Image (cartoon, coloured by chain):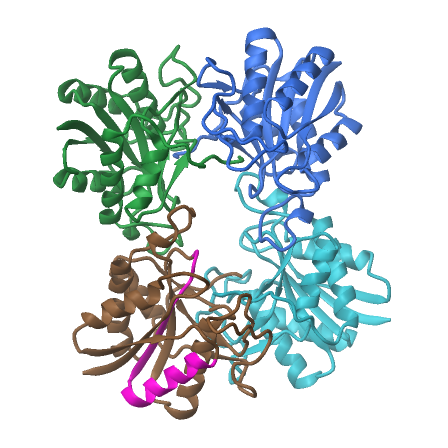
Chain colours: A brown, B green, C blue, D cyan
Amino acid sequence: MSRVLLTGFEPFAGATRNPSWEAVRLVAAEAPDGLEVTPLQLSCVFDQAIDELRRAVREVEPELVVCVGQAHGRPDLTVERVAININDARIPDNAGRQPVDEPVVPGGPAAYFATLPVKACVAAVREAGLPASLSHTAGTFVCNHVFYALMHLLATERPTTRGGFVHVPSLPEQVLDQATPSLPTASVAHGLRALLATAAVRRTDLHTLEGTTH
Amino acid sequence: MSRVLLTGFEPFAGATRNPSWEAVRLVAAEAPDGLEVTPLQLSCVFDQAIDELRRAVREVEPELVVCVGQAHGRPDLTVERVAININDARIPDNAGRQPVDEPVVPGGPAAYFATLPVKACVAAVREAGLPASLSHTAGTFVCNHVFYALMHLLATERPTTRGGFVHVPSLPEQVLDQATPSLPTASVAHGLRALLATAAVRRTDLHTLEGTTH
Amino acid sequence: MSRVLLTGFEPFAGATRNPSWEAVRLVAAEAPDGLEVTPLQLSCVFDQAIDELRRAVREVEPELVVCVGQAHGRPDLTVERVAININDARIPDNAGRQPVDEPVVPGGPAAYFATLPVKACVAAVREAGLPASLSHTAGTFVCNHVFYALMHLLATERPTTRGGFVHVPSLPEQVLDQATPSLPTASVAHGLRALLATAAVRRTDLHTLEGTTH
Amino acid sequence: MSRVLLTGFEPFAGATRNPSWEAVRLVAAEAPDGLEVTPLQLSCVFDQAIDELRRAVREVEPELVVCVGQAHGRPDLTVERVAININDARIPDNAGRQPVDEPVVPGGPAAYFATLPVKACVAAVREAGLPASLSHTAGTFVCNHVFYALMHLLATERPTTRGGFVHVPSLPEQVLDQATPSLPTASVAHGLRALLATAAVRRTDLHTLEGTTH
């Protein structure tokens, strides 16, 4: 049995729902075989979200940590490859904080790479029938903040635990009149299950073509 | 009991599935209360599709005809407002025909408007939790061809039957690595049911703001 | 010498500039050989714009009328093929009018096709080095309104005069922080000159593949 | 007089032109006041491009190095903030090499940040009337490769020289029938001049809101 910590976010930017948390709950309620998935809802608040994550990692002692966030406008599940050491908020977080050009971890390295087999994760989601791709930026808001803090925590304190971040599309109900891509929660949860099942057992990545020219 | 003829298309352009037909089948298998929905799969072939549609209209004697087609790249259900008298195929149809700048109906008017309450249909889909919008072009391929032929048939032979056309997004399975919007069949079927339930009973349209500046 | 009436619009929706009028002025100041181009700025006001156009057509007695408007978000010059008999304003015009689902011309046909050789116009713009495409919807705001009224006027009163509509992208200065396509006025004017030179002399269109599947 | 090394790329992926090099040449031919701009065309070849860059830096001994590349599909000048230590080519380079998941510099840090005042550069381009934005990924092809190698070179051997990377849109001539954003060379060069003039004199960055939620 592999212990997995799977986080989603509370709603932000005035929304009443967050697809990341809704999908995480579904996945945890019906986890892939062999995985014990602990769901955690993170606040969409700089630093506070890190505290919540850190506490849960200490309690759960997971072998795998996957954080999930919403990427309004993206049409597919995107597996993030790079977390950068920048907080640069275009909008305030849920506590009204809006850091601009501050480090996530003062003195930390410029970036961390996910330690998931990211291309195998992309392939697993597609195999499950959902669109997926590799992403090279998780933005500069609370998603990237949590992703960077997670990788820093694992690198400095829990080197055998692997971790990463996945962005998911908005819900259909959130884009009713917006001409913006969306996927229902059940679809996203189905894709996340396939991703976790692969991430939990694969140690090496696939060498598929998922790069971008820019 | 209202009789509804609901058509979808066979796969085309090398695809193995067509979301329009898959959704139509689901809707017909579990039709909205008060509606008797006859599903029909149309060939993606110029003129032949019209013959198939015309024959079914004669047999079913529907009060409402809604044709559904796939719009690869669109993120939402789009209710078409205008059918134009042009066949202008960028790719060959399933029989290898590729008419360029020919009329659908020689001597027919330049265009027909859908006789559905198109804005009420958009609102109904949204109320059901799925994204929708009004569209002012159904393209110039077999979808527009069937839409125009339907409206011409109703205008000239069955003035009390109302009709229209709805475009639906691609399936998730069709865009696995394409970074293109999609919606699963169950979602699309759910939206179409709401649309039919409204179209079957409303005679007048809503006066909501769904226009476009270009 | 061919007489051409070339119209652009005043700024609208709070903007201070309109690329259509700026390009039209440039074209008129340095017209293609053999063309006498009369520029006209139309108000972005329902009905009033039609009156202005009608008056100018009477005065100039052109052989060719091309109206130009701005299509924020489109990346290329788009030659419009279809004008529809609907005013459906999502935003108020410059006089505060906002018609919803009213006809441009009560009792007029559902649509008119442009009488320009639209595909030859697209090809001419491309040959001049600017991106272009054929469009099957000019929207439902003042652009389509003027386009429809123009085609109705020509069809009913001046059958030997040909006419059409072209949408052009926003200016770079209008999208500074918007991640939205744009083209500078000189480029747009260069493309329009090529379009006019072709439209003025060609009577038949090219049979190129410019259709769309939706 | 500030010495600036400004690089563009040769055409790649079958193209016959590269807007980055065309704009670089224009800028160098008419450099901003106070700047001595040395233009350099880099091969679109992994490693070889780095050798060319390294040699030029040694010869020119610049105070500022800005590398420019083409980002097909982007509508504006994008100032890159992050270079990552990954070569992951989706297509072969001009020598047929296609590294997948290899480091740019074995043992190098995961990423470097540009040492340009990136937000001031974005603001300067906009002030010059051209659209611009901050980007957090330069992809994983030769552009990112050169960017990372540049920042590594400066960090390890020339700490007083500052450097960065700018992506520019495709040329109008490259997207004639593609419905893809573009900007002409003169516009791009105008924006780059404004960027260089600012980058050469500003030591601290602006604290404007240019972050992204994802």
Front-lying residue, D143 or D137: D137
Residue A69 included in the magenta stretch of the image: yes
User: Where does the image place residue D25, in percent across and percent down from the top left?
Assistant: 75, 56
Please give the range of residues in magenta: A47-73
Q: For residue C132, which quarter of the picture?
A: top right
Front-lying residue, C151 or D112: C151
User: Where does the image place residue B52, in percent across and percent down from the top left?
Assistant: 20, 23
Seen at 38% across and 79% down, the residue is A115
Q: Quadrant of the N terminus of chain B?
A: top left
Seen at 60% across and 22% down, the residue is C47
Seen at 40% across and 36% down, the residue is B134
User: Where does the image place residue A98, in percent across and percent down from the top left?
Assistant: 55, 72
Rendered position, D29 above or below B99: below
Q: For residue B166, which quarter of the picture?
A: top left
Rendered position, D144 above or below A163: above
Tell me: B53 left or right of B123: left
Rendered position, A150 above or below D182: below
Can residue D73 be spotted in the picture? yes
Tell me: C145 left or right of A27: right
Q: For residue B120, which quarter of the picture?
A: top left
The single residue placed furthest to the bottom in the displayed view is A157
